[in-house]
Image (cartoon, rainbow, N blue to C red):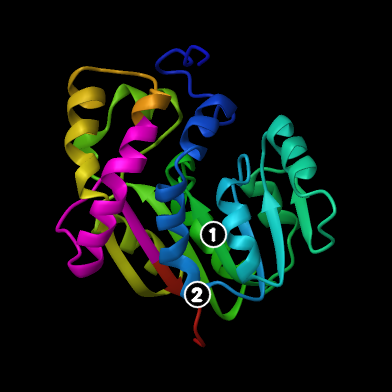
Amino acid sequence: MASPPTVGEPPEHFPGDVLEDLGDMPNYNGWIVDHFTPWLGGRAVEIGAGLGTISERMRPGVDRLDLVEPSPDLARRLVEKFAGDPDLEVFDQTLETWMAKGTPETYDSIVMVNVLEHIEDDFAAARGLYDALKVGGALMIFVPALPFLYSNLDKIYGHYRRYTKPTLRDCVSAAGFEIEKLHYVDVAGVLPWWLLNTILGKTSFHGSSLQVYDKCVVPVTRICESVLHPPFGKNLILVARKNES
């Protein structure tokens, strides 16, 4: 894996090698998308599509899919990955540019996985996403949680914050959304993240360890959390609806 950027100098775009490590977690990524599946449909957009790991899992559930990716290299790889799909378009743009050029009330579904924490003014982003949705459309978000877990790894990869349920709720509700689902996920990931990253100061991911976690821990955690939502977790899942004013 390439060396991470210096602390205090967040990368302009999330590193592709990190995305490859995180993408090689089929159980974890499938778990995320399954949280969103009941709300997916129609014309959808994924903000910060990266390598298309979430996009390819979303694609069967929507009629048309737009992908917004600010990294030219990652956008090129997305074009190659989904070549031949006439109902999928890649936009090599930042979120801010995409929102400024977009047409209001265009989408039925908007998905953001590990993206909102990279946006300095997340309240403004939520307002722009609200405008981009049709009435009745759904916003689906997955973000890192628990501020006490914030580490140098968060910092060097451009995370402005880790969320709590109240802070994420406030951000999305202030834009006008009605929240339909909001809870913590991945309680099992809290201790290893706290120990390895927050306390010991690791500033990179270890691909083999992620794969073991995905294969051995995620399936059990998923079953447990399907029965009872934990009171805390390494991440937060949110689904919100744009309803009639």
Taking 25 as reference, is 183 left or right?
left
SS for callout 1 = strand
On screen, residue 215 versus residue 34, left or right, reads left
Single out the residue that lies furthest toward the bottom: 244
- Secondary structure type for disc 2: helix
Badge 2 crowding class, 10 Å Cα cut-off, few under 14, some 14 to 19, many 20 or more, is some
Nearer to us in this view, 86 or 165: 86
166 left or right of 79 in image: left
Q: Residue at x 20, y 49 (%)?
A: 187
Badge count: 2
The quarter of the picture where residue 179 lies is bottom left
Rendered location of residue 198, percent (x, y): 22, 26
Is 132 within the magenta? Answer: no
Q: From the viewer's side, name the closer residue of 99 and 137.
A: 137
Can the viewer see residue 51? yes
Picture coordinates of residue 4, whole percent (x, y): 47, 16
Give how far across and how far down residue 210 sits, in percent: 37, 32
> Can you tell which mark lies on residue 39?
2
Q: Earlier in the sequence, mark 1 or mark 2?
A: 2
**Kind of residue at disc 1:** Val
In the image, what residue occupies the spot 34% across and 27% down?
209
Determine the residue positioned at 41% across, 35% down: 159
Q: CA distance from mark 1 to mark 2?
A: 10 Å
Using the rendered view, name the quadrant where residue 111 is placed.
bottom right
> Which stretch is magenta?
210-238
Identity, as a three-letter code, of the amino acid under mark 2: Trp
> Where does label 1 land, which residue?
111
Magenta residue check for 217? yes
Look at the picture and state if 110 lies above or below 149. below
Is there CB contact under 8 Å for labels 1 and 2?
no
* Circle 1 crowding by C-alpha within 10 Å: few under 14, some 14–19, many from 20: many
